[in-house]
Each structure stands twice: as C-alpha cells, then as structure tokens.
C-alpha cells in the first residue's frame, strides 16, 4: 500500500522520527539502527521505507532506513508471539545482517540476549524464519566461514550461481566443502558443492 516517505526530518529521538511531507508531519516508530543512520539528517530531507500497522484500535507507522530492515521487521512480526514493538527491539539490538547470521547459524543465544526475548521465542524465530532468510539472503550477509578471501571460493560461487543455484545455498555448500578441504581447487569445490545442493 505505502512503500516509503520522503520529506524533511523535523524531529528525531532514538525511538521516533517525524518526517514532514506536504505540510503533514508523520510520526514514525524507528529502531536504534535507523536512528543511528539518520540522526545526522535533522532538518534535511530523508527517505524512509514504511510499514503501516493496524490492529484493533491502534494504527502506527514504522520507519526504516533500508528495505532490508523493513523486510526483516515484516518477517519477525509474522512469527507467533512477536509483535511490532518486540520486532523493533530485536532490530534495535541486532543489525539485519547480524540477525540473519544468527538465524542461519542457529545461534539461539544471540537472539535470546535481546531484552524481552526468551529461549522459546528465540528458537521459534530460527525455526520460522531460517528457510525464508536463506532464500532471500544476498552474498553480503552470509560469510563463507572465513573463506570469503579465497579466490577459488568466489570463482566457484560465480559458477554455481550462473548454473542457476541460489547464492545463499551455494555459499553454504562452498563453505562446507572448504571446511573439509581448505585448499581445494575450483573444479573440486564446484563438484563437491553440487552434491550438497
């Protein structure tokens, strides 16, 4: 329905921002990550991606500095037991990339360390979102287990993605191969990764 708002940032606190557009000030609930990104833009033009949340008698706008953060927010609020404020708390404690990494690596403790998140909720986040995050993740969010500096791994990743395999799944497979055979040549990486895909 609404994608973003562009206008002058007239007020900013760690939890809220007011963006004026055509003489109307829109109060947006924001995360600490978005606050850190836009706090220097007071009285300047900003563009925030928005989510309009309506529940019973409450309607609120949430603002995000990136589409990725908004996407993660939407995924989080679809997890049973997580509402918008809890999702915002998670995104205030962890960056989108940190949260994706925690989900993919089953790091329950990293998510549980967020204030107000118990072990069951942390486990539910991982179970509900792992497949969605892996399918939607891009290469910048998934380290290759220390193999990112390995030119063979980059070449193998390029080959696998050209063959039509998803980048995230390819990276995971390559990472597993390089754990087993750290100095494998490109051809061997590709062959062994194909067996894991």
Image (cartoon, helix red, strand yellow):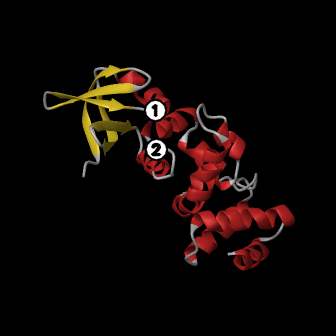
Q: Quadrant of residue 59?
A: top left
Q: Position of residue 163 (x, y in %)?
A: 58, 78
Q: Quick one: which residue is furthest to the left in this view?
A: 23
Judging from the image, what secondary structure is the residue with disc 2 in? helix
Is there any visible trace of residue 111 in the rendered image? yes
Decide if residue 131 is on the left or right side of residue 148: left
Judging from the image, what secondary structure is the residue with disc 1 in? loop
Q: Quadrant of the C terminus?
A: bottom right
Question: Rounded to the nearest whole Å, what is the CA distance between mark 1 and mark 2?
Answer: 9 Å
Q: Callout 1: 10 Å neighbours few (<14), some, many (20+)?
A: many
- Look at the picture and state if 14 lies above or below 93: above
Q: Position of residue 173 (x, y in %)?
A: 71, 68
| Residue lying at 72% horizontally and 66% vertically, measured from the top left | 174
Decide if residue 52 is on the left or right side of residue 163: left
| Residue lying at 43% horizontally and 49% vertically, measured from the top left | 74
Q: Position of residue 104 (x, y in %)?
A: 65, 55
Q: How many marks?
A: 2
Decide if residue 22 is on the left or right side of residue 18: left
Q: Earlier in the sequence, mark 1 or mark 2?
A: 1
Query: Pointer 1 and pointer 2: residues touching (CB < 8 Å)?
Result: yes
| Residue lying at 37% horizontally and 31% vertically, measured from the top left | 29
Residue on which disc 2 sits: 69
Q: Callout 2: 10 Å neighbours few (<14), some, many (20+)?
A: many
| Residue lying at 40% horizontally and 38% vertically, measured from the top left | 65
Residue closer to the observer: 29 or 35 = 29
Residue on which disc 1 sits: 31
- Look at the picture and state if 160 lies above or below 19: below
Is there any visible trace of residue 181 in the rendered image? no
Residue closer to the observer: 154 or 194 = 194
Q: Quadrant of residue 171?
A: bottom right
């Amino acid at each position: 329905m609404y994608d973003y708002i562009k206008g002058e940032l007239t007020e900013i606190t760690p939890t809220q921002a007011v963006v004026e557009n055509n003489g109307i000030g829109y109060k947006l609930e924001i995360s600490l990550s978005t606050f850190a990104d836009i706090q220097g833009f007071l009285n300047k033009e900003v563009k925030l991606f928005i989510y309009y949340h309506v529940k019973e008698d409450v309607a609120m706008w949430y603002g995000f500095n990136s589409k990725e953060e908004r996407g993660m927010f939407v995924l989080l609020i679809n997890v049973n037991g997580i509402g918008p404020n809890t999702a915002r708390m998670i995104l205030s404690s962890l960056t989108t990339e940190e949260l994706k990494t925690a989900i993919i690596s089953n790091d329950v403790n990293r998510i549980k360390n967020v204030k107000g998140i118990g072990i069951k909720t942390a486990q539910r986040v991982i179970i509900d979102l792992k497949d969605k995050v892996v399918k939607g993740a891009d290469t910048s969010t998934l380290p290759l287990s220390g193999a990112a500096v390995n030119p063979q791994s980059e070449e193998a990743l390029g080959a696998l993605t050209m063959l039509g395999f998803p980048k995230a799944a390819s990276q995971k497979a390559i990472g597993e191969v390089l754990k087993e055979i750290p100095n494998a040549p490109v051809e061997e990486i590709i062959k062994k990764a194909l067996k894991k895909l």
